[in-house]
Image (cartoon, helix red, strand yellow):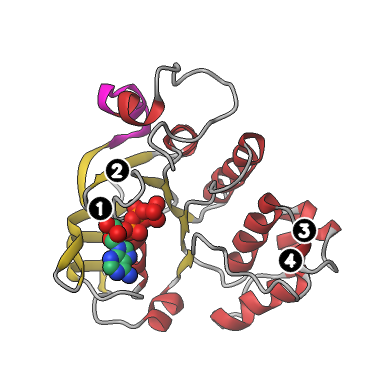
Amino acid sequence: MTRPMLEAENLVVAYGKVEAVRGVSLTVAPGRLVTVLGANGAGKTTLLNALMGVLPAKGALRFEGDDLMRLPVEARVARGLSLIPERRELFATMSVEDNLKLGAFRFRAKGGGGDLGEMYRLFPRLAERRRQHAGTLSGGERQMLAMARALMGRPRLLMLDEPSLGLAPLIVAEVMRTVARLRDEGVAILLVEQNARAALRIADHGYVLDGGTVVLEGDSRTLQGDARVVETYLGSLSVDEDGPPGRAASGR
Ligand code: ATP
């Protein structure tokens, strides 16, 4: 098996005395797409924030064999980690293109970040809208811009917090296809989702988080067929059905 790129072992994250993440272990291998599924409040965002260094955590965390635990956020970004938060955090009154340029500036990656031409190739809609204010984009386009801006920092591991949130099913499918394409282009992905159906369609491997712990883990096909996943997240529809992905049964 390929050596993991990211290895978290027994991570614990607490808000005061309340533990929101309770002993989570997970790995992401290079070039793989791993999803973390879970209902509202399962601890998914907390976990991502701990991996990124936004929240302090206990346990062990390695990236390409190096200890990340004591590194601040900027140092983790410099190593190649990038997090797209649930709220996407674009600059609404700046143009699409200026938001993209800021991605390269903020991350100050060695070698100067990604180039605009490459982003417009990956996201043709953004090329069409390059002069528009980010605030005028549709929800799906904003998610695309958030991804493209993160890619301008040339991440090696891209972490996405619920990119499907608030998007119509057809747009969710488009966002997921884009995430899968990024994986195919070599970026390792950690995808946090409540929309298990959409996430498992594109992921290689998945973890199910409940109450801050991993309750299930396996390759996507196995999870798609697991009775507990089907019952809790996929409802009664067949997982092979190729209709538009809906929100998870346990969604908000
Ligand atoms: P969501 O889909 O709503 O984002 P989640 O799986 O990402 O859910 P978290 O946001 O990580 O879950 O929350 C995990 C637990 O930690 C919840 O019980 C939540 O109420 C609690 N929590 C989250 N943020 C804080 C905070 N800043 N202070 C105290 N408790 C928090």
Classify mark 2: residues with Cα within 10 Å, few (<14), some (14-19) or many (20+): many
List the residue tagged with mark 1. 26
| CA separation in Å, label 4 and label 2 | 34 Å
| CA separation in Å, label 3 and label 1 | 34 Å
Main SS of the magenta part reads: helix
Name the residue: 24% across, 45% down: 210
Name the residue: 62% across, 83% down: 105
Answer yes or no: is residue 50 visible.
no
User: Which portion, as a residue range, is magenta?
Assistant: 218-228
90 relative to 112, above or below: above
Earlier-in-chain disc, 3 versus 2:
3
228 relative to 89, above or below: above
| CA separation in Å, label 2 and label 1 | 8 Å
Q: Nearer the viewer, mark 4 or mark 3?
A: 4
Earlier-in-chain disc, 1 versus 4:
1
Residue 124, given in percent of the width and then of the height, sits at: 78, 52
List the residue tagged with mark 2. 207
Mark 4 secondary-structure assignment? helix
Dot 2 and dot 1 residues touching (CB under 8 Å): yes
